[in-house]
Image (cartoon, rainbow, N blue to C red):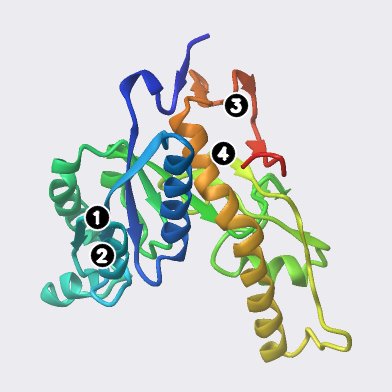
Amino acid sequence: MHKALLHDPVMGQMRVAGFVSGSGTNLWRILEYERRLDAAGSSPYRVVVVFSDSAGSAATRIGAEFDLPVVTRDIDAYYRARGSKKRDLTIRPGFDEATVRALQPYRIDVVAYAGYMSIASPILTSTYVGVNVHPADLSIEEHGRRKYRGDQAVRDAIVAGERTIASTTHLVSEEVDGGRILMISQPVDVSVPPGADLGDGATLRRVAAENQERLKEQGDWIIFPLTLRFMAEGRFGLDDRGLMYFDGEPAPQGHRHDPDET
């Protein structure tokens, strides 16, 4: 059975494009980790360009801080010029096709979807290997489907009575939060203030937001940079059936983060 590495180190340093729509905190951590690896020797991955679909994002500030080129194509302006709404996905491939053309000079191996809020069309998912981080343990299933998908995953886990939450990095596919799992973070205890009424919508939103912020710090910001490092080192692979491997061993539900991994 043939197994293909997601990135073969023989091909050199893995070249990454960071995609952001807002504050870009995930990308900031990826770049800080790259600096740490360089200080210790050499990072196996290199962010070579920042791309944003929003003129109001932090992309320019990140580019200035880390001396990186920035490409911005405002998706709202794209839709306005065509008299359409962003929910109209029939014209999204045109936007993504122009994005791919704009990024061609950077010879990208992997896209890190670091807070990129636009749904990627098949143009993007077929051109680049994409990695995303999601605020839930995507290995948890219900009725044969991933239970905690979508942008309310933390809230849904709290409502379901989960005692812990975790982050997952996964390959980006056409199905939102449906790509193959790469890494799952250490569990983070759910914190609910004594006496909090989770039946109250405002209280539930506040508790979910507080837990999601803790999960970012203890989950997202740890495993996202590590996932890129491990990919760049040739530790992730897929076989002919699409089964994920880590260090040559089957990992159908990804690699569980070991606290000793830094």
* First in residue order: circle 2 vs circle 3: 2
Q: Distance between the residues labelled 2 and 1?
A: 7 Å
Above or below, 121 against 12 in this view is below
Q: Mark 4 points at which residue?
A: 182
**Which residue ends up furthest to the right in the rendered image?**
194
Instruction: Tell me which residue sits at (11%, 75%) in the image.
Output: 81
Camera-nearest label, 3 or 1: 1
**Could you say which disc has been placed on residue 64 in the image?**
2
Q: What amino acid is found at the position of numbered circle 3 in the picture? A: Phe
Amino acid at the residue labelled 1? Leu
- The residue beneath circle 1 is 68
Decide if residue 11 is on the left or right side of residue 158. Answer: left
- The tag on residue 120 is none
Q: Residue at x 16, y 70 (%)?
A: 78
Can you tell which of label 4 and label 1 is closer to the viewer?
1
Residue carrying label 3: 246
Front one among 211 and 244? 211
Q: Along the polypeptide, which appears first: circle 4 or circle 1?
A: 1
Of the numbered discs 4 and 3, the one sitting upstream in the chain is 4
